[in-house]
């Protein structure tokens, strides 16, 4: 940089740190409670209906752990970049990000966290070897999280970030990367 040349730094907007922390503190237990109840119901249904185990043990445990090892780091990266570059929390009701995030996994897909939720649930369902969780809870969670991403979040993000988000959508896939032709 030449001497005397003005240095322009993009000032990142941020939600207050205490607001971000509080939004994570109440949202995480709520999400875990919903998932816990879903698995309790699935395990109860397996027992009451005498449903078969979908996997041979210990294959279920290995497969469940592999799914977690693949998808949980993507989920954590999504949370990290929403906080760091988005200036907010993944909890949109309390500390919604104030900047459009296009870094980390968001460089490749628009909804990395919503993509990972069903696979994380599938990992737990597989680990628990629950027939109803694998065949009912996992697809149901995919429908809920993917609908939320494609309908509710897309509408809100377009409203919040306008043309910038519309342009981002053109170059970045919702759940799968878009590859540009050379």
Image (tube, rainbow, N blue to C red):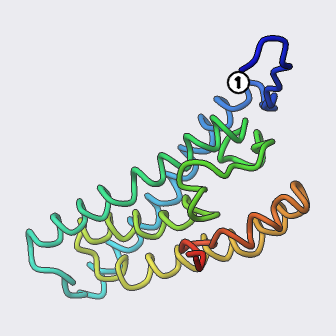
Q: Quadrant of the N terminus?
A: top right
Q: Residue at x 59, y 65 (%)?
A: 109
Q: Residue at x 83, y 26 (%)?
A: 8
- Left or right: 144, with 32 as reference point: right
Question: Which residue is outermost to the front?
Answer: 2
Locate residue 164, reporting x and y percent: 84, 58
Q: Quadrant of the C terminus?
A: bottom right
Q: Quadrant of residue 68?
A: bottom left
Q: Residue at x 21, y 84 (%)?
A: 54
In the picture of the structure, the residue carrying the numbered disc 1 is: 17
Q: Nearer the viewer, residue 53 or 101?
A: 101
- Left or right: 160, with 1 as reference point: right
Q: Nearer the viewer, residue 166 or 68?
A: 166
Question: Which residue is outermost to the top?
Answer: 3
* Vertical comparison of 48 with 103: above or below: below
Q: Nearer the viewer, residue 172 or 5?
A: 5
* Vertical comparison of 178 with 40: above or below: below
Locate residue 14, reporting x and y percent: 78, 31
Locate residue 165, reporting x and y percent: 81, 61
Q: Nearer the viewer, residue 163 or 95?
A: 163
Q: Quadrant of residue 24?
A: top right
Q: Quadrant of residue 98?
A: top right
Locate residue 22, reporting x and y percent: 67, 30
- Left or right: 59, with 78 as reference point: left
């Amino acid at each position: 940089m030449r001497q005397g040349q003005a240095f322009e730094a993009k000032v990142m907007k941020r939600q207050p740190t205490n607001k971000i922390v509080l939004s994570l503190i109440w949202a995480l237990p709520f999400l875990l409670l919903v998932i816990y109840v879903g698995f309790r119901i699935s395990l109860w249904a397996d027992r009451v209906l005498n449903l078969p185990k979908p996997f041979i043990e210990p294959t279920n445990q290995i497969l469940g752990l592999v799914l977690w090892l693949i998808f949980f780091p993507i989920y954590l990266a999504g949370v990290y970049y929403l906080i760091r570059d988005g200036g907010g929390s993944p909890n949109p009701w309390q500390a919604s990000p104030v900047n459009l995030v296009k870094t980390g996994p968001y460089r490749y897909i628009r909804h990395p966290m919503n993509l990972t939720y069903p696979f994380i649930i599938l990992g737990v369902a597989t680990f628990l070897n629950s027939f109803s969780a694998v065949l009912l809870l996992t697809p149901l969670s995919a429908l809920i999280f993917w609908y939320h991403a494609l309908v509710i979040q897309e509408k809100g993000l377009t409203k919040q970030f306008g043309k910038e988000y519309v342009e981002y959508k053109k170059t970045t896939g919702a759940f799968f990367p878009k590859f540009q032709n050379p």
